[in-house]
Amino acid sequence: MSAPDLALWVYLSRTPLLWLTVTLVVYVIADRASAAANRHPLGNPVLHSIWMLGLLLWLTGTPYRAYFEGAQFVHFMLGPAIVALAISLWETRSQIARAFLPMIAALVAGAIVALTSAVAIAMAFGAPRDVLIAIAPKSVTAGVAESLGGDPALAAVLVILTGVLGAIIVTPLMNGLGLRDWRARGFAAGLASHGIGAARAFQVHPTAGAFAGVAMGLNALFTALIAPFLVRLLLD
């Protein structure tokens, strides 16, 4: 890189708008590739955006804090995006009302199994306590782990991994099980892999997306209530 190019890069890298633009461009590229692959599960745009952005940060020597100063607007928009799920919930309110009792049963079973199985497996491998606490809310949010005394950074990584893996395997798994009900497929995706799974569900079918949004919200609330009790029960 020539001296003028290096000087230009140093100037641009200090501009918050640069990394916001880079993030949006990378996601558009990943989404176009996903569309070209007919939305194949392995073409998940979130997955490929992560490694492309990570590679760019590594090649340019950009620290994460510098990146986040520019990309934090995307982080801010997560809130409005989640609130916007209410539109699809309202449009499918009659279907949601008819499936209320099965959803509650699936919520209780799914949330408890997701939390206890992950912690039990990690315990079997000898994971330390702070790691176990970070693993517990992997299907919901890192905020729950922080409130329990776990490592929020590790919890955030686990939450992202859970979401991406869930979004990748949910379609072939449901197809393999012969499950055709879009309500059940969407609810399972949202319950196990939160927002990333819900985004995948919307790509597949609007009804699946709506039920994934319901599952994501209910699971966040229910896990926040039961996590302190179950974590103490498992670890003490």
Image (cartoon, grey):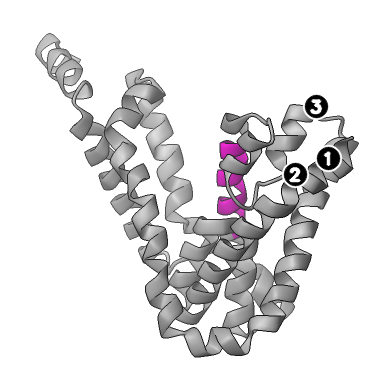
Q: Is residue 153 left or right of residue 84?
A: right
Q: In the image as oriented, which residue stretches furthest toward the top? A: 3
Residue at x 65% of width, y 51% of height: 224
Report x, y in % for residue 134: 68, 36
Residue 217 placement: quadrant: bottom right
Real-space Cα separation, disc 2 to disc 3, in angstroms:
17 Å
Q: Does the magenta-highlighted stretch encompass residue 164?
A: yes
Instruction: Check whether the beta carbons of the residues at disc 2 and disc 3 lie within 8 A of each other.
Output: no
Q: Is residue 129 left or right of residue 234?
A: left
Residue at x 37% of width, y 26% of height: 57
Between disc 2 and disc 3, whose residue precedes? 3
User: Could you classify mark 1 by the number of other residues whose Cα lies within 10 Å: few (under 14), some (14-19), or many (20 or more)?
Assistant: few
**On screen, 75 above or below 1?**
below
Q: What span is colored magenta in the figure?
A: 155-166
- The three-letter amino acid code for the residue at tag 2 is Pro
Question: Can you identify the residue that label 1 sits on?
Answer: 232
Identify the disc placed on residue 228: 2
Report x, y in % for residue 205: 47, 78
Identify the disc placed on residue 128: 3
Residue 15 placement: quadrant: top left
